[in-house]
Image (tube, grey):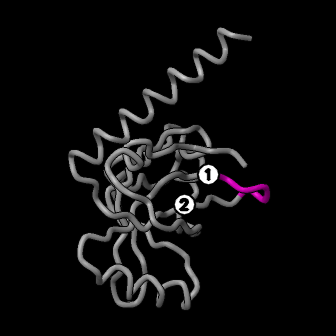
Amino acid sequence: MKIVCKNKKAFHDYHIDKTMEAGIVLTGPEVKSLRAGRANIKDGYAQLKNGEVFLYNIHISPYAFAAHSVTDPLRVRKLLLHKREVRKLVGKLNEKGVALIPLKIYFIDNGKAKIELGLARGKKLYDKRASLKEKQSNRDVQRSLRQQD
């Protein structure tokens, strides 16, 4: 599995309740650009529309050596999910404060691009501070353990 990009900011800004994997409908030059690692998912989100899930604000840079039409880097992309997965999402996304956030884009062994989505609830400012404090204390403990060895 080759990871193209991660959304580190999502773990800082949201509580991730559940994750799921989905396929992405891409054009040929977009796949080549992803293989080169030229994507940004920091501002991205997914929404339900007419019983299908679409991905918004994901920037995949145009492939430099593409011979034919250049696609819009911020175009809306369709996600490939089973009907039962979409039905589960419908109920959860109707709750207040729940969003579908992309966490990472990666290639699996057979060469297909996948995206990991997370059902997320927004963190309050005090939650963000508490998680930063916890992360810092864990770092300090790890440092002290390494120094003892």
- The reply to whether the C-beta atoms of the residues labelled 1 and 2 are less than 8 Å apart is yes
Residue 58: x and y, percent? 38, 54
Front in this rendered view, residue 142 or 86: 142
Q: Quadrant of the C terminus?
A: top right
Q: Which amino acid does label 1 sit on?
A: Tyr
Q: How crowded is mark 1: few (under 14 residues within 10 Å), some or many (20 or more)?
A: many
Is residue 46 within the magenta segment? no
Q: How crowded is mark 2: few (under 14 residues within 10 Å), some or many (20 or more)?
A: some
Tell me what residue is drawn at x 43 percent, y 82 percent: 89
Front in this rendered view, residue 144 or 16: 144
Residue 42: x and y, percent? 36, 46
**Is residue 62 visible in the rendered structure shown here?**
no
Which mark identifies residue 40? none
Tell me what residue is drawn at x 59 percent, y 15 percent: 144
Q: Which amino acid does label 2 sit on?
A: Glu
Identify the residue under disc 1. 106
Q: In which image quadrant can residue 3 be found? A: top right
Residue 67: x and y, percent? 53, 47
Task: Tell me the magenta residue range.
Answer: 107-111
**Is residue 1 visible in the rendered structure shown here?**
yes
Element carrying mark 2:
strand
Image: 49 above or below 144? below
Residue at mark 1 to residue at mark 2: CA–CA distance: 8 Å
Identify the residue under disc 2. 116
Q: Earlier in the sequence, mark 1 or mark 2?
A: 1
Tell me what residue is drawn at x 42 percent, y 77 percent: 53
